[in-house]
Amino acid sequence: MLKQARHLVRDTKIKYKNNTKHTRSGKVKLKPGIDSRLKKVFALIGKPEPRPFKPDRFQLESLEAIKTADCLVTAPTSAGKTWIAQEIISSIFHNCNSNNACKAGGKAWYATPLKALTNAKYNEFSNQFGAKNVGILTGDRKENQNAPIIVGTTEILRNQLYDAMHNGQTLLTDLVVLDEAHYLGDEDRGVVWEEIMIYLPPRVSLLMLSATIGNADNIAKWLSSIRKNKCFVIKETKRPVPLFPLFLHPSGTVLPLIGQQNHKEKTKISPKVAKFINSTRPVFLAPPRQLPPFGEILKILQKYNLLPGIFFLKSRADCNKSIDLCSKNLILNSQQKKRLCKRVDELIAKNAHIKNHSQIWHLKNLAVGAHHSGQLPAWKIVLETLMSEGLLNAIFATSTVAAGVNFPARTIVFLNSDRFNGKEFLPLSSTEFHQMTGRAGRRGLDKIGFAMAIPGKFMDIRHTAKLVNMPSSDIHSQIKISFSMVLNLLLSHTPSQIENLLDKSFATYLIKIKKRNKKIDKETTATHKNLVKDFTRHLNFLKEERYVTFNGELTDDGLWASKLRVDQPLLIAEGFRNNIFPQSDPGLLAALMGSFVNDQITDDRIDKSLVPKKMLTTFFMVKKHLKPFTQRMISHGFEVSPLLLKPAVSIYAWALGKTWDKILLTADIAEGDMVMLILRTIDNLRHINSLDHVFPQASKTATESINLLFKDPVVTHIK
């Protein structure tokens, strides 16, 4: 279906309806209009009457369930899942019983997948429980680590579980909250969620919050089987703000996307939209490889009171170009502009690198902004703050906004029915669609929210219409073996015990269920066998390289190497074991650690004559000495990422005090990517810092390296 949509346009000659006007410059001029059936729907637009807060049924049921068992809560975005966490944390913190009798307080751990979300929850909880009672743990921030309430990223929580098992201790908390629990199915990071669920002591209550889990009952049964605790599933399907799907016809007329239907019918496209889809030469708002007239589209949304809006686009470049297309949509309300400009100035005051941002004019004069991962974190926070405070008309964003960033709008606008997953374009899943539309309709500010589809080359209208009422996708196990996992589990387990742990995986549970139902297939059987086989393969290589003894115990090298909880722990460990790295030069050490972070830079070509000789000599010396080890890894079937020169040179220049603009020219990447490269390099250095008992000089130098790197604009001053 998606392929059909991609080939709807067979040439670049686009024909437009008679009521789609063009200026002499060739630009489209839309004629705003609405289908008569939308008049009653649009009459619902407005702010609901304020009323005292009253918990919903699912919120009260969740609070009751978590008192005696684990609990998985699935509810739409903005339904009030965080309120559940706040209430149970408050109860544990004050250690109050049902009669409100309170004793010495307990402890809670709130884990999120994103640093931005972690920072937001930290601020939220600090306001509620007092700053002295809340700590934060991420790769960038470690504050108040002994506080009774900790907010942090899931990787930090997983690492604390490793340490607790190694020391024969229990995790010092009474409750763990896993926010965005559907990340269990994330291809890259789902393994971290699964490890936490497997390792977490049964005495620690587990509360999981998610908007998008199709097979929640299976997950709960799996958890009950491995934790020996009952796990309740609390489901809420009703959105706090109803969603109405729309379609923007190329003429400028807004139509309902879905026709009238009863409970027996499947989602059915409205007749006028169906007529458009079935036309032999469908009309689009822009020729291929060009963006539609967003300025005209914004005027339509504004005319029918459908703003603020979030436009989801394919690429960063499209987001940046889109705001230029709104250049004539000047803010007419002087009071709005005055408030917006004042707030923008307040937010950027402490961040010199965004004071002259190229999109400041668009922000202040058009009330629109572009939000994507290529921008500085401080700039993204400015946009998120302005949107959440209702000061912007529109945000043009990539789909990364859908997960974990809280700035709802009245209308979500789709231009594509597919999404790039880092490797290829795939049709939007129901989970991804519901995450995006979860931003449509602001609780307390809107009576109704809208999701608008705009036709184009990469928009499959039928697929989008089906997604509206399609249940959330099932989550599948993403557990996979890594050297870091094996080293850390060997701190506290024998190889046979680790195999027993793997038997507790969600993947194994699903296979057992299929066997029980006689629905097992060759692929799932192979998955289970490969998990154990892959563990054995990693273990045998560690034995060959003397990180593990023949009996399956960590050697001295294996003990300290386990502290390197990074992407390529063995390569870094080998560098230190053979005294390859410059342990007394903070700039060079930072540079070399940057070369192990290579997913931000794809083109490693660089003019070597511009690279300091000391840097160049050290880099190629390290690469030469690590080559035999990397070849052994490759010969055993392990994937080895190449060491790249350009990130090392960029990090070295930043450590030596070169200007930010100079660094960006060297790296040839976007600002946001450069910040990510630096932050991930800092994370590598922090793990080296933990090796002070084995490599005291390198540990000390790593601290100096971090201080050289962690400066504006890597540091974000906006809270």
Image (cartoon, rainbow, N blue to C red):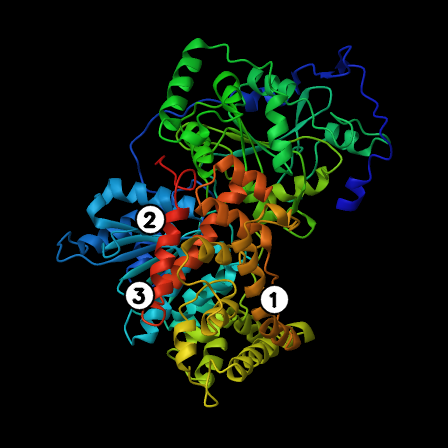
- The residue identified by callout 1 is 640
- Mark closest to the chain's N terminus, 1 or 3: 3
* Amino acid marked by disc 3: Val
Q: Is residue 360 left or right of residue 297?
A: left
Q: Where residue 703 sits: x, y (%)? A: 35, 56
Camera-nearest residue between 385 and 217: 385
Q: Secondary structure at mark 2?
A: helix
Badge 3 crowding class, 10 Å Cα cut-off, few under 14, some 14 to 19, many 20 or more, is: some
Q: Where residue 159 sits: x, y (%)? A: 38, 64
- The residue identified by callout 2 is 84
Q: Nearer the viewer, mark 1 or mark 2?
A: 1
Q: Where residue 502 sits: x, y (%)? A: 49, 76
- Mark closest to the chain's N terminus, 1 or 2: 2
Question: Image point 45% across, 39% down: which residue?
Answer: 377
Tag 1–tag 2 contact (CB < 8 Å): no
Cα–Cα gap, marks 1 and 2: 43 Å
Q: Secondary structure at mark 3?
A: loop
* Amino acid marked by disc 1: Val
Number of marks drawn: 3
- The residue identified by callout 3 is 204
Cα–Cα gap, marks 2 and 3: 17 Å
